[in-house]
Amino acid sequence: MRKAFVILSMVLALFLGLNFQAVGSAKYTKETGKNCKFCHESVPAKGATDPKLNEEGKKFKDNGNKLTDDQKAEK
C-alpha cells in the first residue's frame, strides 16, 4: 500500500511539474506566435539559471522581453 502511495505521489508531482511548464509555453506562444526554440538553443530545464538564449532570445531580452519589430515580421 505504501509503495502504491509513493508511486502515485511521484506521478502526480511529475504531472503538475509538466503542466506548469506547458502553461508558460502556451501563454508565450499565444502572445507572440513563436515557440520556445525561437529564443532558446534548447528548452531549459525547470529552474535552470541559464536560459540558453540564441541570438533572437538575446534581442528579445534586450528589448524588455518584447519582440522587436524584425522578430514580429518573422514567421
Image (spheres, rainbow, N blue to C red):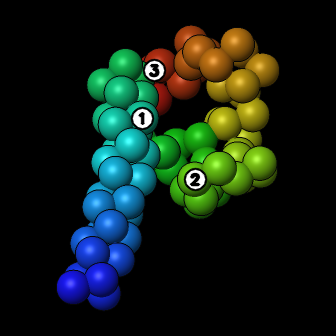
Q: What residue type is disc 2 on?
A: Lys
Q: Earlier in the sequence, mark 3 or mark 2?
A: 2
Decide if residue 1 is in sight here: yes
**What residue is pinned by disc 1?**
24
Is residue 11 placed above or below 2 in the rendered structure?
above
Query: Circle 1 — which element?
Result: helix
Check residue 67 in the rendering and tell me which mark sits there, or answer none: none
Q: Is residue 75 visible?
A: no
Q: Residue at x 29, y 61 (%)?
A: 12
Determine whether label 1 and label 3 are within 8 Å by CB: no
Q: Is residue 21 above or below residue 72?
A: below
Pick the front one: 74 or 56 = 56
Q: Which residue is mark 2?
A: 46
Percent of width and height locating residue 18: 37, 55
The one of 14 and 73 positioned closer to us in this rendering: 14
58 up-or-down from 2: above or below:
above
Does 41 sit left or right of 55 as displayed?
Answer: left
Seen from the viewer's position, the closer of residues 4 and 22 is 4
- Nearest the viewer among 57 and 51 is 51
Could you tell me which secondary element the residue under label 2 belongs to?
loop
**Amino acid type for the residue under numbered disc 1:** Gly
Label 3 packing within 10 angstroms: few (<14), some (14-19), many (20+): few
Work out how far the residue at label 1 is from the one at label 3, CA to CA, in angstroms: 23 Å
